[in-house]
Image (tube, rainbow, N blue to C red):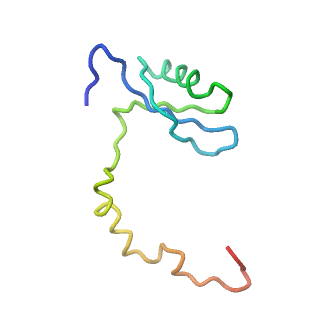
């Protein structure tokens, strides 16, 4: 997917909140480069000092699975029952988990 010559690239913005350990997607914006994208993201998405860290990623660089491919993509995990917590016996002395 290419960007028209008269339009800046699209960037996806991720912010790590004051009390969070992971970044979360907050939106998108157009910017000429990564530095401008971070500054614009700061101005648009952290107006009230909500964040401690900003990630910007060119949208064109993101590869994602399609929701329509959910079945074939996740079916192999169904045959690995040992990954499900119901496979293990929890001793009574452990209590509720």
Q: Residue at x 42, y 28 (%)?
A: 11
Query: How many numbered discs?
Result: 0
| Quadrant in the rendering for residue 33 | top left
State the image coordinates of residue 4 (x, y, percent, origin top left): 26, 19
Q: Residue at x 55, y 24 (%)?
A: 44
Is 73 positioned to the left or the right of 20 in the image? left
State the image coordinates of residue 67 (x, y, percent, origin top left): 33, 53
Question: 35 or 86: nearer the eye?
Answer: 86
Position of residue 66 relative to residue 46, above or below, is below
Q: Residue at x 28, y 63 (%)?
A: 72
| Quadrant in the rendering for residue 5 | top left
Question: 90 or 41: nearer the eye?
Answer: 41
State the image coordinates of residue 2 (x, y, percent, origin top left): 26, 26
Is 23 positioned to the left or the right of 18 in the image? left
Q: Residue at x 44, y 32 (%)?
A: 12
Position of residue 29 relative to residue 78, above or below, is above
Specify the quadrant that holds the C terminus.
Answer: bottom right
Specify the quadrant that holds the N terminus.
Answer: top left
Position of residue 84 relative to residue 24, above or below, is below
């Amino acid at each position: 997917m290419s960007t028209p010559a008269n339009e800046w690239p699209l960037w996806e913005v991720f912010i790590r909140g004051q009390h969070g350990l992971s970044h979360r997607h907050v939106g998108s914006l157009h910017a000429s480069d990564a530095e401008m994208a971070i500054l614009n993201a700061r101005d648009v998405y952290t107006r009230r000092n909500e964040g401690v860290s900003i990630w910007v990623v060119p949208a064109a660089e993101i590869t994602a699975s399609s929701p329509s491919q959910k079945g074939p993509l996740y079916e192999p995990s169904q045959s690995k029952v040992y990954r499900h917590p119901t496979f293990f016996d929890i001793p009574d002395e452990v209590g509720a988990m």
